[in-house]
Image (tube, grey):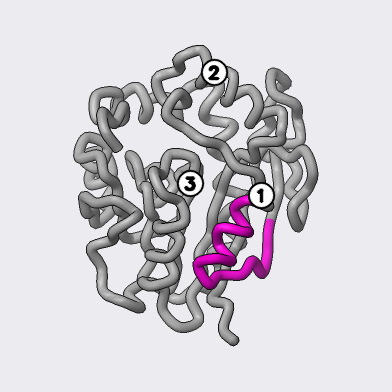
Amino acid sequence: MADNPFNHLAQRYDDWFDSPDGAPLFGLEVRCVRPLLEGAPHRWLEVGVGTGRFAEALGVEEGLDPSPAVLEFAARRSITVSVGAGEQMPYADNSFGGLLMVVTICFLDDPGATLRECARVMAEGGALVIGLVPADSSWGQHYVRQGEEGHAFYSRATFYTCQEVISLAGAAGLMMDDAMSCLFTPHGGPIDPDGPLRSGIVEGAGFVAMRFVADHP
């Protein structure tokens, strides 16, 4: 990504996770993602690892990101990091049992290519877990508006619906086999990090995690 804002705003991005707005959201999203990674064989990789907050919380050992600045933070969290893009991963075929992308797909230059790479590096019996803010939720619509107003990060983002991601994954040879939803409070309302989780893709949920496996014939 040209002029990647994460390169010069890494500290601002990382600080958000400890802020009054960010901390409860982060806690809730970690709880939503965690059950979908269970059972995936290690080694695990987070694509778009950022500063390593999710990888650290979820026990993901390795991380890939195009921004060297954020990877400095991830490395300090004991994540084994590599600089690179999801569209062309520097890993051999069948390298990872578990792959994770949390609020990453909206920042990808080519999500289809990245999902094909995920399928390539995924080991037999492995899984890819994608966490996203759906474009058709009140949270997604808020972030889209922020992007249109020039937000440092969201102005570079393209938000997708869950069905759009499922279609992109299907084209890469991956099928969804489980999902969890959370964040049922409309944007602007209070956030409870211990708030409810619901199985499946729930309409209007502000955060959805989906697990994909290889779609073998």
Neighbours of disc 2 within 10 Å: few (<14), some (14-19), many (20+) = some
User: Judging from the image, what secondary structure is the residue with disc 2 in?
Assistant: helix
The residue to which callout 2 is attached is: 146
**Cα separation between marks 3 and 1:** 11 Å
**Cα separation between marks 2 and 3:** 18 Å
Q: In the picture, which quadrant includes the N terminus?
A: top left
- Closer to the camera, 41 or 59? 41
Q: Which residues are magenta?
A: 164-179
Q: Is residue 15 magenta?
A: no
Q: Residue at x 42, y 25 (%)?
A: 153
User: Judging from the image, what secondary structure is the residue with disc 1 in?
Assistant: helix
Q: Residue at x 48, y 46 (%)?
A: 105
Q: Residue at x 52, y 30 (%)?
A: 23
Neighbours of disc 1 within 10 Å: few (<14), some (14-19), many (20+) = many
Q: Amino acid at mark 2?
A: Gln
Q: Earlier in the sequence, mark 2 or mark 3?
A: 3
> Where on the picture, by quarter, is residue 215?
bottom right
The residue to which callout 1 is attached is: 162
Q: Earlier in the sequence, mark 2 or mark 1?
A: 2
